[in-house]
């Protein structure tokens, strides 16, 4: 059975087609710059790659292009071969504690949550509608970033603000990157031999970055909060800062709160500190050239990651494994070393050679905590959850 995972933004659609349950990737690709004359379409299968530039006016045309591409390249005979489409959704709020099959009510509920994730949820709904138009006879599912974190207890997810902000306005920590944290923590648990009361910390460090504490397969805390701006510093995002700064700097620089918010999201993190780049590889290059602010950007992030790990160690009363994933976590030995060197108090020791070689396990034999590097796979989680949902429905 073929299941497609879809991850859409306001101007892009990324997809992966899986044979399930074997989880073999049959094809993948993307449409980007939707709405522009020079939009792009890329498709990859059997080691071959095709791409073209053309105007793509809407998500519906993008979805059509993807399905036609699959048929044209004989990846599927006709669209009936696609058994279901799973869509990634960033914000499920408290409404969605489980992934679900799409209907009109579900779409409206996702739109109702758009105030809390304006950049994402609206685009997701536009994309789901587009795919439902193109593939009207297959089930569509929604898989939420927030669901994996919905197991957090009140002491982890509440903010100390007036209580009605929570009850009336949903102000609480939701957490994000849930599908990645689920995939990586499950795989880590498997490597640990599915031990009882396992305590795993996942460091998903990419352009966006978040840490989660997973006890016995269940998320107990995570670093992103009400929005993906919270937690550790990222490519362009601040992570947690003193909220009083917003008001203060707004007055000093004559900026509205929306303008300050934009800077915290888009001009901070690596980019803000280094003044050079938001990209980790470019940052490493700049460090090699002796740029002290670029070094500080990395050091500062590493300290904050270590701080979260320390706090989760205390919260879970120990930790069996720390796993690094995502673009930077899985690919930057420098970042991993910077973090692990700050964890001596927990008895964490890594082997520099294994770290440089990106071995799956980089800790030394006498390390009190095992340290792993695992590539994340959010798309396969979407396909797995979609398969579960359509089986349940059948
Ligand atoms: P993601 O958001 O997970 O796709 O991660 C994107 C980030 O990963 C960017 O900052 C990239 O520069 C970074 N990245 C990718 N490959 C490497 C690498 N080999 N070394 C360091 N950073 C990398």
Image (cartoon, rainbow, N blue to C red):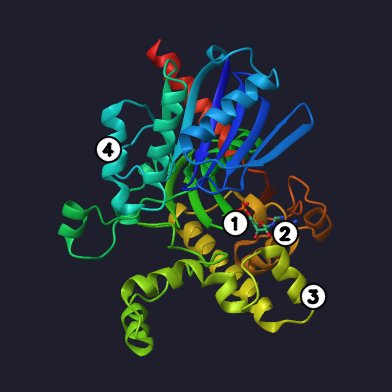
For mark 3, what is the residue? 288
For mark 1, what is the residue? 205
Decide if residue 341 is on the left or right side of residue 102.
right
Q: Earlier in the sequence, mark 1 or mark 3?
A: 1
Please tell me the numbered disc located at residue 109.
Answer: 4
Point 38% across, 70% down: residue:
261
* Closer mark to the observer between disc 4 and disc 1: 4
Mark 2 and mark 1 residues within 8 Å of each other at the beta carbon:
yes
Measuring from the top left, give residue 389's x and y in whole percent. Answer: 42, 21
Give the spatial CA distance, label 2 vs label 3.
14 Å
Residue that lies at the very extreme toward the bottom in this rendered image: 252
Decide if residue 362 is on the left or right side of residue 344.
right
For mark 2, what is the residue? 332
* Closer mark to the observer between disc 3 and disc 4: 4
Q: Residues within 10 Å of mark 4 (few under 14, many from 20)?
A: some
Label 2 beta carbon within 8 A of ligand 1: yes
Measuring from the top left, give residue 141's x and y in whole percent. Answer: 42, 27
Q: Mark 1: which secondary structure?
A: strand
Mark 1 and mark 3 residues within 8 Å of each other at the beta carbon:
no
Label 1 beta carbon within 8 A of ligand 1: yes
Q: Earlier in the sequence, mark 2 or mark 4?
A: 4
Q: Earlier in the sequence, mark 4 or mark 1?
A: 4
Give the spatial CA distance, label 2 vs label 4.
39 Å
Point 69% across, 48% down: residue:
373
């Amino acid at each position: 059975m073929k299941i497609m995972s879809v991850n859409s933004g306001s101007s892009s659609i990324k997809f992966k087609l899986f044979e399930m349950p074997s989880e073999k990737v049959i094809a993948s690709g993307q449409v980007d710059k939707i709405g522009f004359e020079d939009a792009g379409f890329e498709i990859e299968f059997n080691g071959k790659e095709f791409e073209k530039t053309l105007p793509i006016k809407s998500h519906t045309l993008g979805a059509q292009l993807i399905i036609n591409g699959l048929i044209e390249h004989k990846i599927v005979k006709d669209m009936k071969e696609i058994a279901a489409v799973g869509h990634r959704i960033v914000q499920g709020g408290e409404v969605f504690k489980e992934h679900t099959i799409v209907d009109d009510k579900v779409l409206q509920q996702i739109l109702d949550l758009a105030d809390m994730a304006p950049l994402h949820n609206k685009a997701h709904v536009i994309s789901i509608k587009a795919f439902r138009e193109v593939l009207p006879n297959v089930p569509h599912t929604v898989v939420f970033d927030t669901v994996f974190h919905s197991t957090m207890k009140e002491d982890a997810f509440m903010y100390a603000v007036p209580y009605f902000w929570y009850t009336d306005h949903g102000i609480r920590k939701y957490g994000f990157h849930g599908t990645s944290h689920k995939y990586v923590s499950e795989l880590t648990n498997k490597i640990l031999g599915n031990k009882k009361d396992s305590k795993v910390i996942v460091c998903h460090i990419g352009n966006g970055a978040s840490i989660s504490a997973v006890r016995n397969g269940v998320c107990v805390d995570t670093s992103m909060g009400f929005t993906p701006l919270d937690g550790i510093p990222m490519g362009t995002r601040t992570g947690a800062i003193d909220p009083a700064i917003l008001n203060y700097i707004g007055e000093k620089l004559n900026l509205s709160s929306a303008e300050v918010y934009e800077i915290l999201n888009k001009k901070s993190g690596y980019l803000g500190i280094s003044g050079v780049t938001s990209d980790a590889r470019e940052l490493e290059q700049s460090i090699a050239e002796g740029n002290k602010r670029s070094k500080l950007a990395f050091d500062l992030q590493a300290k904050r990651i270590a701080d979260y790990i320390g706090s989760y160690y205390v919260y879970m009363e120990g930790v069996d494994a720390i796993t690094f994933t995502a673009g930077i976590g899985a690919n930057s030995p420098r970042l991993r070393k910077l973090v692990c060197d700050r964890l001596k108090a927990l008895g964490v020791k890594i082997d520099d050679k294994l770290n440089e070689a990106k071995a799956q396990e980089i800790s030394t034999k006498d390390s009190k905590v095992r340290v792993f590097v695992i590539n994340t796979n959010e798309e396969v989680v979407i396909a797995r959850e979609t398969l579960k949902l359509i089986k349940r429905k059948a």
